[in-house]
Image: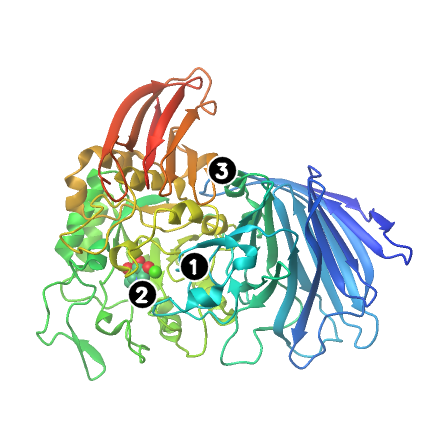
Amino acid sequence: MKTKLLIIGIVLALFSCNPKDKQVTEITSPNNNIEVSFNINEEGKPFYKVKFNNKTIVDTSYLGFEFKDAPAFKENFIIKNMTIKSFNETWQMPWGEQLDVVNNYNELKVELQEKTSPERFLNIVFKVYDDGIGFRYEFPKQTKFKGDVLIKEEHTEFNLTEDYKTFWIPGDWDIYEHLYSTTKLSEIDAIAYAEHVNLAQTHIPENAVNTPVTMVGENGIHLSFHEAALVDYSGMTLKVDTTNLNLKSNLVGSKNTDYKVKRSLPFNTPWRTIQITDNAPDLIESKLIVNLNEPNKLGDVSWFKPMKYTGVWWEMHLGKSSWDYGMEMVDGRWTDTGKAHGKHGATTENVKNFIDFSAKNNIGGVLVEGWNTGWERWIGFEDREGVFDFVTTYPDYDIDEVVRYGKEKGVDIIMHHETSAATETYEKQQDAAYALMQKYEMHAVKSGYVGKILPKGEYHHGQYMVNQYNNAAIKAAKYEVAVNAHEPIKATGLRRTYPNIISREGLRGQEFNAWAEDGGNPPEHLPIVAFTRMLAGPIDFTPGIFNIKFDEYKKNNQVNTTLAQQLALYVVIYSPIQMAADLVEHYEANPKPLQFIRDVGVDWEKSLVLNGEIGDYVTIARKERQTENWYIGGITDENSVTHVLVFDFLDDNQVYDAIIYKDGKNAHWNDNPLDIEIEKMELNKNSRLIVNLAEGGGFAMSLKKK
Ligand code: NOJ
Ligand code: CA
């Protein structure tokens, strides 16, 4: 790793902007396209502005805080000191969308002090990159701030200058599993959206959106607002002022306190981020969010290997089998009282079947859900504390035998910890649970937080839960366990610091297609997700459903894409663990498309976004680290699209054996989703290929060096 830190020094770009002489400090991105200026107004209120290609995109936006038991940080500040420096390094991801990541920015640090008593200090740091900006507040150690800092609200503004086309989900304090709405910024109405939501957990108190929220301007400016390094703080939603086109931070709170964040000095807030590009593909290629996080604190993490996995999972969502066995609680213990219903999915035999299938098909892991006692009371029960223990198996699941068999076949078992959001139980059980995994050499756990949080009054996205998720991952690392959380806190690039945070849900995943009463995820869902949720980090979407209509299980649900699109998702959606989610029998009936799942990589040297328009279509090419083979995936929304692919990214003088899996002539996500054409060809860097994507369709390609 090469780190080059160049301190330009305290050379400030200070100049007078009005006769009253206000200090203005500007810094620009390394390529000069983005410019941030900071100032304080006559009342001493701090504010900033952002320009992109000389156009103001964030106009005068004030910054401040409201505290409990202390006067607000609002005005009355003077600038004590300002420093500018430049930074340029290249760091490596242990696994990821790419190997090398360039982290190059100019930084402005402003040190503020209140002009009059209590004369407290606040620093604001801006980092300006070629692909956007990040800024955060630093609360230095100081005697003038007595006791803990109790933040009632953070007042960070983003005062926008255009009525952007906006892709948003509501600012729910409890769940991100919502469909995206596409409206003008001035037409965002999260409250109206909230009236139609029917989920086990949801709390949408304001007309606010969650992040990442992505916008497109008339002249092609693309913006995405988010946060980086969310640590010991609550998640930020953005309250929308539809009249003034202004976004304002609205932190997630708790019913148990009349403040939203409690910290002791010194501390830093998460980074408030804006990714800024002049086209949609560059948003996906942006590495701003990970760059704003600290380097790897875990050291060698080679005990985790990126992998594809199958699992005892989709069958429960389809209703073919169940998580629970049919036990009863007797004297505080789960007891087999002879009421087993015979539908239990996680049996030794069933898991062995998945192990066999995985071993035959170049798939490294098998997830087993419903293996431990407690599933009889996991959802819809108030008293969920103590229900799960994460070590006691159901009688028909022989974990020793399953792990032994897996090892014999070279297949890892992926652990599952559904906490049902009873966090105190989970906290108490974590050491025992991770130690069990270590004993079996299991290196990955999928965790889940379904339902309202216990302790009551907390929300999934507040400071209490941010700490739960982060601490679980930090503890897991000690046992060489990597975490894939469902119903998680948003991804904010912490995977750089703790690479064992491998993936997460945090969106409407494939499961909604199995049971959502609204008909599942519409074809536009993933072409929006790629430019919103995916900017935050890896997604455990669980693609690869071949039996698209599954009428034998559920007549009123289906996957709303073509089969070819299901293959494309292995490349379009990034995750170092990628599920082949369908049932073994559905794959075995379709060996030809299955070949793509067998072949496709999960760990990349390089990723290129070949084309894309938010909510319409996107095509991504990724080069596999170990083999230097390329894989390409393209998806579209409910409209068909034709692309002319060029392959100039391929190696010079190299011929590739390519296979394309594309929508057939009559393919359509609803009318004919299984119509797929598979074609073999030879390609090199001068090749061109025309590919048609059907309505709700896609294509996948493998290109292996000849
Ligand atoms: C919700 C998760 O998203 C899903 O994948 C899992 O099967 C269930 N919870 C049960 O834990
Ligand atoms: Ca979920």
In the figure, 658 relative to 244: above or below? above
Give the alpha-carbon distance from disc 1 to disc 2, as whole Å: 20 Å
In the figure, 32 relative to 464: above or below? above
Q: Earlier along the polypeptide chain: callout 2 or callout 3?
A: 3
Residue drawn at the location 47% of the way across and 34% of the way down: 611
Residue denoted by label 1: 478
Residue drawn at the location 77% of the way across and 61% of the way down: 111
How busy is the neighbourhood of tag 1: few (under 14 within 10 Å), some, or many (20 plus)? some
- Label 1 sits on a secondary structure element that is helix
Give the alpha-carbon distance from disc 3 to disc 1, as whole Å: 25 Å
Q: Is residue 493 left or right of residue 63?
A: left
Position of residue 476 measured from the top left corner of the image (x, y, whole percent): 41, 60
Q: Which amino acid type is shown beneath numbered disc 2?
A: Glu
- Label 2 sits on a secondary structure element that is strand
Quarter of the image with the C terminus in it: top left
Residue denoted by label 3: 99
Residue denoted by label 2: 418
Q: How is the image coloured?
A: rainbow
Q: Which amino acid type is shown beneath numbered disc 3?
A: Leu
In the figure, 231 relative to 551: above or below? below
